[in-house]
Image: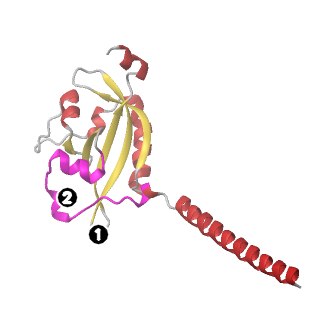
Amino acid sequence: MASLFTNRKMFVIATCMFLITMSSVLFIVGEEKIAHEIDHTHLQAFILQHEEAETSHDEQFYRDLIDNRDDEFAIINTDRSIKYISPKLEEIHHITLDTNQPLNVLTLIHPKDLTQLANTLMDYNKDPKKRSGIGPIRVQTSSGTYIDYLITLIPVFDEEGEKVLSAVVVKDISTPLGEQLQTR
């Protein structure tokens, strides 16, 4: 009889352990499934108050806004004129932000890359969300040469949900990594 009682105890304990293990596994798998369904890059929201969108800001403000610490970037108005350009890009491309003569950024793009970029911009304007890995796109420097960039487009919205600005983050890919290491 004692053996039957011991066997029942063992069965109850084993069943409880099995149920606890399975519920933990289901809980963990369920959380992983939820984590995979949510793409945090699409949840990232860049929102400006109306007054902030109209005002010019410094580099650190825009870097914080678009969460960009290292890459060069430009902030573009909805009419494709440049609102802000990072100092290094301004130096390389000798762009001046003259408010009387706004510069349309498409004038700097290589003619053979315009079609690809125009198609991407049309899709971006229809559905403004962050788009990465666009390119390579060749952008003209002040000397007339071109630099190959990979581009990321980041929309900036106002409090009503309207896109008021776009950040164009560029990564220079004109020099292969191996050649950069050899010059040091």
In depth, the one of 156 and 67 nearer the eye is: 67
Residue 159 seen in render: yes
In depth, the one of 15 and 38 nearer the eye is: 15
Q: Quadrant of residue 18?
A: bottom right
Amino acid type at image mark 2: Ala
In depth, the one of 62 and 161 nearer the eye is: 62
Q: Position of residue 120 (x, y in %)?
A: 43, 45
Does the stretch in magenta take in 87? Answer: no
Does the stretch in magenta take in 49? Answer: yes
Q: Which residues are magenta?
A: 41-68
Circle 1 residues within 10 Å: few <14, some 14–19, many ≥20: few
Residue at 37% over, 58% down: 44
Element assignment for label 2: helix
Residue at 59% over, 63% down: 33
Q: On the rendered image, what quadrant is the C terminus found in? A: top left
17, above or below 156, in the image: below
Q: Position of residue 175 (x, y in %)?
A: 38, 21
Horizontally, is 26 left or right of 159 in the view? right
Marks 2/1: CA distance?
12 Å
Reading the image, the residue beneath label 1 is: 160
Residue at 33% over, 37% down: 170
Give the color scheme: rainbow, by chain, secondary structure or one colour.
secondary structure
Residue 78 seen in render: no
Circle 2 residues within 10 Å: few <14, some 14–19, many ≥20: some
Give me the disc on residue 53.
Answer: 2
Amino acid type at image mark 1: Glu
In depth, the one of 133 and 119 nearer the eye is: 133
Q: Position of residue 97 (x, y in %)?
A: 14, 40
